Image (cartoon, helix red, strand yellow):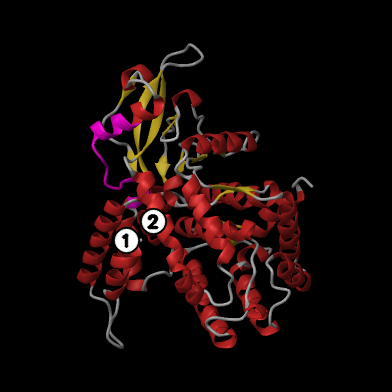
Amino acid sequence: MKLAATELPSMAGRFVRPEGGSLDAALVRASAERALRTLGELRGLAMKVGQTLSYVDGLLPPEATDVYQKTLSALQSHAPTVSFAELRAEIERGLGRRLDEAYVRFDETPLAAASIGQVHRAAIADPDGGPPREVVVKVQYPAIAQALHSDLRNLDALRPMVAMLAPGADTRGGFEEIIRHIAAELDYTEELANQERFRELLAGFDGMMVPRPYASHTARNVLTMDFVPGRGLRDVAENGSQELRNRVGEAIFRFTLGLAMTRGVFNTDPHPGNYLVLDDGTVAFLDFGSVKVLPDGIRRQWRDVARCLVDGRLDEWRERAAEMLGMEHMDPEVRRLHQDQMLATAAMVATNADVTIDRAMLRDAVLSGVRTAKDIGRTAGWLPSRDKTVAVPPDFVMVGRMQLGLFAVLAQLGPRANWNHILRGMLDSAPD
């Protein structure tokens, strides 16, 4: 993978500092701007790495975090674009008709751009016979499928490094699951089906909505949906009232973790660019390229483990969580280290009181995770035997990715709520 082979080492090297020294502000800014250019040009998997750096606290030194996040936030929706002539060819190839036959109007200037495609405003004839409907059209970059598949083929080469960075974790099945979900983002017809599923799930929910997609204007490389006017999450985080941030944070929490635990379905890659906030505070959810549907057995098992946590039955939680996450066979000390870290990061839902989720909380959780990984490495060895390895079911691997993204997004907003009460209510209403 180009990024891992050439860019990450040089970017990381810029943060090596003398003992007791501090990072030079100009050097950090220059590094962030170079990272933006490099990751934007590489697109695909490389850009996804940049998107993660743009909103997850604790991955970079504190002095570099704010500068990197503000700079790389452009990758969430304003990445470098390709020419309209190239995009027109992609649209006409995908839909099998001329652009002016498919759309009443099509704006040449992109509205947004991200890791595998860019978005344009347009209008289509109303299928119900009314005036033209304002829509947005997501179009894949030319040749992005080949580039992403190449990156995914090379991703497996990183498995030994991941094993070293995450001692005590069995990465064999997880890699295949991650690769499958990233590859699925290249099929916009599957994304349309996901989007329709979530529209149905949100029927009757207040404060949340999903734009209507149009199958008549969708192909593997083109996706058309209703245009939704709204503010970006960064704007809400920086300028919204505490009341609005609380409301938006609760909606995102219910949509992501709530639907995952109660319905067994979730977007695996929540990040700030996937949300818009309407004038009335309703949150629009936008991206459904990577969606995981849990088998019913695993969903029920996870729901029961979560009930133990919110009820404060921690001994039972340890027993059931060990069974769910493949920890029963493990060395007791290594299992304890894993579970203590899990409880620490779940404190905000385990506590029956109002809790503010902020960037300091996320930063502490990430740093605590690093310390725990070191402790596990010292206890179990950096290439541990199976009796000291977590055997997470592959179906559960994407849950970790989702949870990290969710709490990183919430940390940007700084919402305050009784998350224990919210989750308990959703679990109580979950179908058997």
Residue 61 in view (yes/no): yes
Mark 1: which amino acid? Lys
Q: Are marks 1 and 2 in contact (CB under 8 Å)?
A: yes
| Residue 179 lies in the magenta-colored region | no
At 54% from the left and 77% from the top, the residue drawn is 167
**Nearest to the observer: residue 80 or residue 167:** 167
The residue sitting at the top extreme is 129
* CA distance for labels 1 and 2: 8 Å
Secondary structure beneath label 2: helix
Taking 15 as reference, is 290 left or right? right
Give the x, y percent position of residue 327.
Answer: 69, 73
Quadrant of the rendering where the N terminus is positioned: bottom left
Give the x, y percent position of residue 421.
Answer: 69, 56
**Nearest to the observer: residue 268 or residue 86:** 86
Q: Reading the chain from its start, which is encountered first: label 1 or label 2?
A: 1
Dominant secondary-structure state across the stretch colored magenta: helix
At 75% from the left and 53% from the top, the residue drawn is 297
Residue 144 sits above or below residue 279 on the image: below
**Nearest to the observer: residue 33 or residue 161:** 161
Taking 393 as reference, is 409 left or right? left
Secondary structure beneath label 1: helix
Mark 2: which amino acid? Asp
At 29% from the left and 69% from the top, the residue drawn is 11
| Residue 76 lies in the magenta-colored region | yes
Q: How many marks?
A: 2
Q: Which span is picked out in magenta?
A: 75-90
Give the x, y percent position of residue 143.
Answer: 33, 43
- Tag 1 residue: 2
Circle 2 Cα neighbour tier, 10 Å, few/some/many (<14 / 14–19 / ≥20): some
- Tag 2 residue: 151
Give the x, y percent position of residue 372.
Answer: 55, 79
Residue 269 in view (yes/no): no
